[in-house]
Every structure is written in structure tokens, then in C-alpha cells.
Image: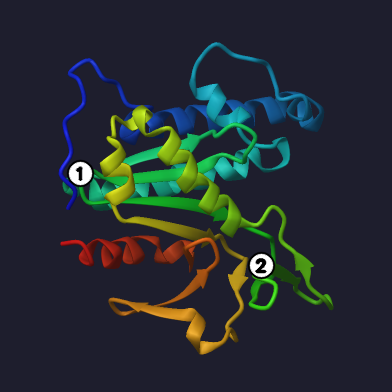
């Protein structure tokens, strides 16, 4: 557990927890309405710029994945709040570092641990880690060969961690807290995308009762399926009790 100073009384965190969940729902509904009303052409232009902050959640993502991404974020945020609210969880969706893809979820258990979660899907395919090249590759069902996953989620998650160090004031964190607090990086694969089951044994780590693919490039990133998120976080928290 990290000892930190409390932020000033007038300090305000970025949208998180229930207010952020409501913003996700409104952004998803707005994007869905725009898609129905104007089709792909409206989404390709980013839709109508709206003064409400929740629209920025939707506009952070590319048009072709916007509605799916918001729906997945809504589902996962609601699940996390239901499971971990009593433990003081703070869930920050859709943080947007400059010149990078959005941070899907930044999770804080203040004074205990932080987690970055990237939600990704590559359709009906398997994700393979190429140890020699230290890259993720994608193998599509019923197709030969592998394609390189760009941008690499492992590199993105490492970039997010550096972004937090530079932008710790957004969360009222001291330099000591941001550097000393244990931070986990998690790549969540959304069905039907799956991690290949034939990775070398040394690439797996045990956490609680889970056997998890742990890829060590620019730090360690844990690769799990969407249905394993709550079990993983419980096992992660148990390390810091």
C-alpha cells in the first residue's frame, strides 16, 4: 500500500464510475441513432459535434468500431462497478492521450494498485505471440499465414503507463504514488477472438487459480478473455492485500 497526500478539497477527477457509465450509455445511444439516421456516411465524418461531454467518448474511436467499442466498455464498466464498488474501485473509461488510441479503461484502487485495460477484437481469429520478433500476430480462421497486429497492443499499454506518469496531476497523484503503486497492464480479447493455446509454457504465469498468458515486452502484459476479467482482478488484488 502506498502512502500519499490527499488532493485539495476542490480537486475534481475525470469522469468515472456511475457518471462515466451513464456517459458511455448516452454516447452509445447517440452513435446508434446517428448510424440509423444517416448511415455510414454520417459516421465517417464523425457525426455532428455536440456540446455534451459524453459525445467525446464516442468521437474518441474510429467510426467503424465506435458502437461496438462503447457497448463493450459499458458492459465491462457496469460489471466492474457491481463487483468491486465496495472495495473503492475507480473506473475511468476513454482517456485520450495525444496522438494515441484511447485508453479503454484505467482502473484505480487508490493507495493499492492501478490497472490499464485494452479491449480488442480481431474477429474470428487467434492471437499469437512471436517471441523472436516480440510482436503479436493474428491468424484468421480458415486462412493461411499470420499478419502483424498494428499498432501493437503491448506497446500501446506501455505508452499508457508512461502517459500516466506525465499526467498524474489529472488524478491527484504525487510522483511517489504514481511510481510506487503496482500497475498491471491487461489485454482483454473479446469473443470470437482468442489467444492461441499452443504458446510455450514459460510464457504463462499462475495467479490464484488462473494460468495466464504473460507477455514480457516493455514490462509484462497479461492476456485474458472478456469472461475472465473479474476473476483476474480478484487474483490481482489478492497479491496486494
Q: How many marks?
A: 2
Q: Is residue 169 above or below residue 109?
A: above
Asked where in the image residue 173 lies, by quadrant, the reply is: top left
Residue shown at the point (68%, 25%) measured from the top left: 34
- Picture quadrant where residue 139 is located: bottom right
Image location of residue 150, percent across then percent down: 72, 55
Which sits in the foreground, 137 or 234?
A: 137
Q: Quadrant of the C terminus?
A: bottom left
> Residue 18: which numbered mark, if any?
none
Disc nearer the start of the sequence (2/1): 1
Residues at circles 2 and 1 in contact by the CB criterion of under 8 Å: no
Q: Which residue is mark 2?
A: 136
Does 161 sit left or right of 155 as displayed? Answer: left
**Front residue of this view, candidates 213 and 65:** 213
Q: Identify the mark at residue 88; answer none if there is no mark.
A: 1
Could you tell me which residue is drawn at 78 percent across and 73 percent down? 146
Residue 46: percent from left, percent from top:
71, 25
176 relative position to 133: left or right: left
Which element is circle 2 on? strand
Amino acid at each position: 500500500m502506498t502512502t500519499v497526500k490527499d488532493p485539495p478539497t476542490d480537486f475534481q477527477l475525470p469522469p468515472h464510475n456511475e457518471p462515466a457509465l451513464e456517459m458511455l450509455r448516452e454516447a452509445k445511444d447517440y452513435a446508434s441513432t446517428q448510424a440509423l439516421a444517416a448511415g455510414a456516411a454520417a459516421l465517417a465524418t464523425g457525426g455532428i459535434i455536440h456540446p455534451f461531454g459524453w459525445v467525446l467518448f464516442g468521437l474518441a474511436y474510429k467510426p467503424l468500431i465506435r458502437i461496438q467499442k462503447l457497448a463493450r466498455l459499458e458492459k465491462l464498466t457496469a460489471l466492474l462497478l457491481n463487483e468491486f464498488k465496495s472495495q473503492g474501485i475507480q473506473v475511468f473509461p476513454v482517456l485520450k492521450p495525444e496522438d494515441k488510441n484511447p485508453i479503454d479503461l484505467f482502473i484505480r484502487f487508490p493507495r493499492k494498485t492501478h490497472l490499464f485495460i485494452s479491449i480488442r477484437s480481431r474477429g474470428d481469429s487467434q492471437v499469437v505471440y512471436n517471441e523472436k520478433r516480440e510482436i503479436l500476430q493474428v491468424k484468421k480462421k480458415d486462412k493461411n499465414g499470420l499478419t502483424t497486429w498494428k499498432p501493437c497492443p503491448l506497446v500501446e499499454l506501455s505508452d499508457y503507463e508512461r502517459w500516466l506518469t506525465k499526467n498524474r496531476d489529472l488524478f491527484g497523484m504525487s510522483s511517489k504514488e504514481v511510481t510506487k503503486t503496482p500497475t498491471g497492464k491487461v489485454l482483454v480479447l473479446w469473443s470470437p477472438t482468442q489467444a492461441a493455446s499452443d504458446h510455450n509454457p514459460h510464457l504463462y504465469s499462475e495467479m490464484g487459480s488462473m494460468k495466464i498468458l504473460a507477455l514480457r515486452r516493455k514490462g509484462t502484459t497479461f492476456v485474458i478473455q472478456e469472461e475472465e476479467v473479474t476473476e483476474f482482478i480478484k487474483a490481482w488484488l489478492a497479491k496486494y492485500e
